[in-house]
Amino acid sequence: MSRLNLFFEKRPISSFLLLAILLAGLQGFNSFCSKVSCNGFSDPKFDLWFPYQQGQTIHFQSGQNDTSSLFISYTNKTKASTVSGGFGSHCPIPNAIIQSSRVGSQSNSLYLNYVAFSSLDSTKNINLNFDGFMLLGGAITDTGIAIRSGNTNVQSFYNSFINIQGTIYYNVQLIQLDTTEAYQNNVGVYKIWLAKNTGILAYQEYPSLLMWVKQ
């Protein structure tokens, strides 16, 4: 012990550096042994606007009495978990995924990925593709998907209630893609109606303007 004390007295700078290295090593060791709690995905507004369940089939009917179906083959939400601490470790980003599979010749396709980096709406992003109707949006709010200012080819309208083919629906968002200029050659879905507690309520194709409504 006396020799150790003598070392510290004669070499104060070296002693300080040695202690700092030892403390850093202990801290690093503790971080590797510790566990970090990771949040799972949780967003009630997402659940309201996209209440799909794996294995669910949704049917649509056109104005010409044709039918189409949307089969939800996969849904997943990031679950709460723990990861080991240490350098390079990180929590998975909370997100929700909904995906369909085509069943039969007359079927729809849907892919949706909603990422929530935090509880702040500004950190949330949605990637939606329904039968080629592609939308990169922001957070899901009380009035539907927030359309980012850079999406100049997208229009959005919210209605507390709306009449579609003689039936009243409540809390509906219409999202419409521009069909003029660069988009005038688009063929396919260019309007979708989303409704709370329903998901995709209806869609319309361009240039036929044929409309399909959930049954």
Image (spheres, rainbow, N blue to C red):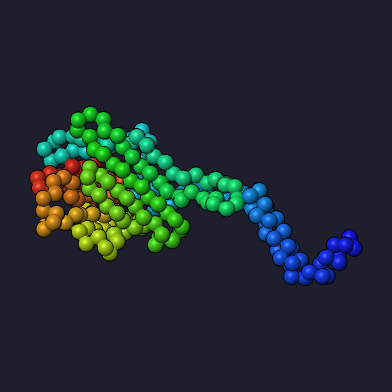
Vertical arrangement, residue 55 with respect to residue 124, above or below: above
Quadrant of image for the N terminus = bottom right
- Report the number of discs: 0
Q: Position of residue 206 (x, y in %)?
A: 12, 47
Q: Position of residue 104 (x, y in %)?
A: 23, 29
Quadrant of image for the C terminus = top left
Seen at 27% across and 52% down, the residue is 135
Return the residue nearer the eye: 172 or 103: 103
Seen at 30% across and 48% down, the residue is 128
Q: Residue furthest front?
A: 10
Image check: 61 left or right of 44? left
Seen at 60% across and 50% down, the residue is 85
Q: Position of residue 53 (x, y in %)?
A: 38, 38
Vertical arrangement, residue 65 with respect to residue 205, above or below: above
Q: Residue furthest top?
A: 104
- Tell me, yes or no, if residue 172 can be seen here: no
Q: Residue furthest left?
A: 208
- Tell me, yes or no, if residue 93 can be seen here: yes
Return the residue nearer the eye: 13 or 79: 13
Q: Position of residue 199 (x, y in %)?
A: 31, 46
Return the residue nearer the eye: 46 or 135: 135
Seen at 39% across and 39% down, the residue is 75
Image check: 180 left or right of 54? left
Return the residue nearer the eye: 19 or 161: 19
Vertical arrangement, residue 162 with respect to residue 75, above or below: below
Quadrant of the rendered image containing residue 121: bottom left
Image check: 118 left or right of 98? right
Quadrant of the rendered image containing residue 64: top left
